[in-house]
Image: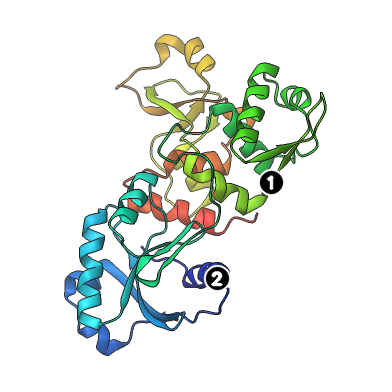
Amino acid sequence: MDVNVRNISEYIEKMVGAEVQIEPLDKAKKQALPILITNAYQLLQCQLLGAEVCLMVCKDADATPMQLKKHCAIVEKALVMHAAVVLPEVKPYNMKRLVEARVNTIVPGRQLFLPSLLMDLRVQRNPVDMQGKPMPVMAQVVVLYHLQKQSLNGMSAQPIAELMGVSYPNINRAVKWLADNGFVELTPGREKQIRFIHEGKELWEQALPVLQSPIERVLRTDKVLDAYVCGEEALAERTMLAEPQERHWAISKQEAQQLGADLHKEFGEHVVEVWRYDPKLLGNNSIVDELSLYLSLRETNDERVHKEINHLMTDRQW
């Protein structure tokens, strides 16, 4: 899977504070590598802080940390230069394994870990334990609402609850969690107003490791629902992905209870995603919101879908 070379260079330049020129790996060097490597990676090269580095853009989303470590070692031995794996995204537990194995790793926008060059830089050192619990559902809704619908800066819990049509205790707990974990600051006084510490893409990147898929369970139905379009059908509306033959709808848990016998675990012509939060809170024009859509599909093993959701986020205007 190709990644945007400009995004890689801009991220590295931002993190190290120096200009980086990335270009395709020299043809002679590429010929010195086994087919195993040339088929599995898009191979680039650059000078980084005086060291020559081969950037190995991984095409296999399922490659394990140990495979990546082995492949880096092959490249370093054959080319006598540093090698770093470039991944469009990585699960927190896999990043932990890559760090433990001391694999040079670059995740544009999130992590620059180059132990052979004594570098470990991140966009945001999040105080949340990435191996612990994900962000609470309502806290996630608050973040996504702020990113996509309207700014919540300067508002206290009660007005936010009224704006979203949810209970004050739920919003109050969400705001407290966001404050405790470094996402928002609270003004002093009884009516504590919030201010997000980061905005736009920086806030998204700070939150992404602890954001969870909105999907609680997936069911099926033969009934045509008056619900928000989600999944591959929603992605097809926004990208070049071919429209699926079956319909995909997202509904709240309350709607699922009301539909009752119309929903089935295995049988039915259409797909129904039961979400942890009401998709109507964030969606527009009967389609689920873009960021929740990404979160619902980012664990997919379908390379077509994976490619399009990455394009969706790359092209997003923050």
For residue 18, the mark is: none
Residue 218 on image: x %, y %: 38, 26
Mark 2 lies on a secondary structure that is helix
Position of 291 relative to 136 (above/below): below
Task: Identify the residue position indicated by label 2 in the image.
Answer: 10
Image position of 102 (left or right of 291): left
Task: Check if mark 1's residue and mark 2's residue have beta carbons within 8 Å.
Answer: no
Image position of 121 (left or right of 285): left
- Picture quadrant where residue 278 is located: top right
Position of 12 relative to 185 (above/below): below
Mark 1 lies on a secondary structure that is loop
Q: Amino acid at mark 1?
A: Ile
Q: Earlier in the sequence, mark 1 or mark 2?
A: 2
Q: Residues within 10 Å of mark 1 (few under 14, many from 20)?
A: few
Image position of 250 (left or right of 33): right
Residue 187 on image: x %, y %: 79, 35
Q: Residues within 10 Å of mark 2 (few under 14, many from 20)?
A: some
Residue 285 in view (yes/no): no
- Picture quadrant where residue 263 is located: top left
CA gap, disc 1 to disc 2? 23 Å
